[in-house]
Image (cartoon, grey):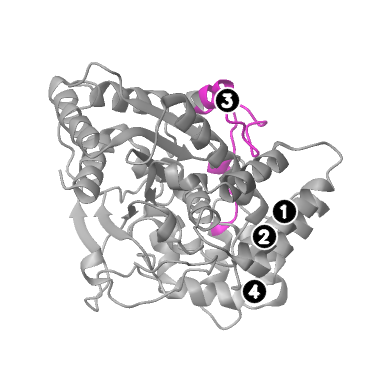
Amino acid sequence: MPQANNFLHSKYTRSDPGERARYVSFEPGAPPFSPAWHDALGRLGKSLRDAGVRAVVLVYGCYLGADLFGSGRLDEVGGLKRGYSRGIPGLESLLAALRPNEYQRSLQDPSCQPPFVNDDAGKTKLDNLLNDKGNFFEQYVKGLQTGFSQTHAIPFTVQRSLWSSLHHHPGRMEGALALLHELNHLKTQKGLQAGDRILIVAHGHAGQLLALLSNLLAPGESSVRETVFETLAYFYEQRETPSESIQQLQELDRLLAEDQFTTWPSLDVVTLGTPVRYGWDTDSLGKLLHIVNHRPIRQDGKRWLAKMELPQIVMELPMASGGDYVHQLAVAGTDAVPASPWEVELDQALRENLEPYDGFERWLECARRVTRCPNDGECLLIDYHDATGTSPDEHLFGHACYTRLDALLFQTSHIVETLYGA
């Protein structure tokens, strides 16, 4: 895998990923919390310990009140406003389907919207509203923790981290800095060091935080990182109210200056349905695996590609018949529009270094490349068999399957087998 990515954006290639990709079909296995389920997780926990994994961190956001596909950015840069869709059958209907809908709003609590706070109260509120639908809820965490601890006297550390779910460059950068702060606290609290491993599993857009973090933590000098630091520091200092982000940026700068990451545990990363966007710097990571809900329904034999045909895709979306459509369509050029002028300016400044793909036609070009596997890391293309006649409220366009409790054992088994050979 290439190193020294230096914040380069992922390339959208239709090339066969070859041995980097495996194709799997979901099998339910033992019922959650049954004796067989716990025994199987106990064996996986032993394999993790044997491989040096000392903690598992689940990173996730929430779709309630959020712009799941980033359609706001598409409208801002053109979209239907300038008639860019003329002559392309089905594009107007596709854009209408991508815009925030009722399933993204909480009728029970209208205030439940980004930015979300990473505290117990916020997590409990989402658990009550969503259960395991696109949400690492408490039972999921406890299931992993008790299962992994079956064969050892010391409980296995499993914790979850909720990020703000602000789907734009400033929101993701702040999320990456906050996550690093949390990892540093975990390292100190558990006494982790070089030779230990932390397994980080990130759902959906939260995976972008890890891609950014891989570039921020890369060893050696980086002119782009220096520019990003200067940009963030300048804008953070303009805030009337002091932000935790400036302290977290200073913390990262200190850790890099003192070369402390050479004594850190390895960070092994698994993404679940994370759209292909930021590039990965693999020199700062241990292992890297991408899991995508995918059904090879193409007729040309290229089973590693998703299906992007207009206008048929508009009919496929509500049934999730091709797999995860958030992964397929929320690519470069999409984003939520920042809420404040300050964030708009910072978003533009960061975009110059993080994402060169700007404009409506460029998004359409990226989406039509139907890339499933990022340039770096291994890739598991799993058919979760979640294609249904129900509304997107149930499956989130194929994006909700990864956090389902009945998929926990199957998915975890493949993660442990792929990364650690158990």
Closer-to-camera residue (383/209): 209
- Provide the secondary structure element on which disc 3 rests: loop
Which residue is outermost to the top? 153
Give, as a three-letter code, the residue at label 1: Leu
Alpha-carbon span between mark 1 and mark 3: 25 Å
> Residue 412 lies in magenta, yes or no?
no
Give, as a three-letter code, the residue at label 4: Gly
- Provide the secondary structure element on which disc 1 rests: helix
- Main structural element of the magenta stretch: helix, strand or loop? loop
Please state the horizontal and vertical placement of residue 17, each as a whole percent of the image.
Answer: 28, 71
Closer-to-camera residue (152/356): 152
Which residue is outermost to the front? 258
Residue drawn 19% across and 24% down? 38
For residue 119, the mark is 3
Q: CB under 8 Å between callouts 4 and 2? A: no
Does residue 29 appear left or right of residue 56 in this picture?
A: left
The residue beneath circle 1 is 232
Give, as a three-letter code, the residue at label 3: Asp
For residue 56, the mark is none
Q: CB under 8 Å between callouts 2 and 1? A: yes
User: Which residues fall within the magenta stretch?
Assistant: 98-126
Q: Earlier in the sequence, mark 1 or mark 4?
A: 1
Give, as a three-letter code, the residue at label 2: Val
The residue beneath circle 4 is 359
Residue drawn 70% across and 39% down? 247
Q: Quadrant of the C terminus?
A: top left
Q: Residues within 10 Å of mark 3 (few under 14, many from 20)?
A: few
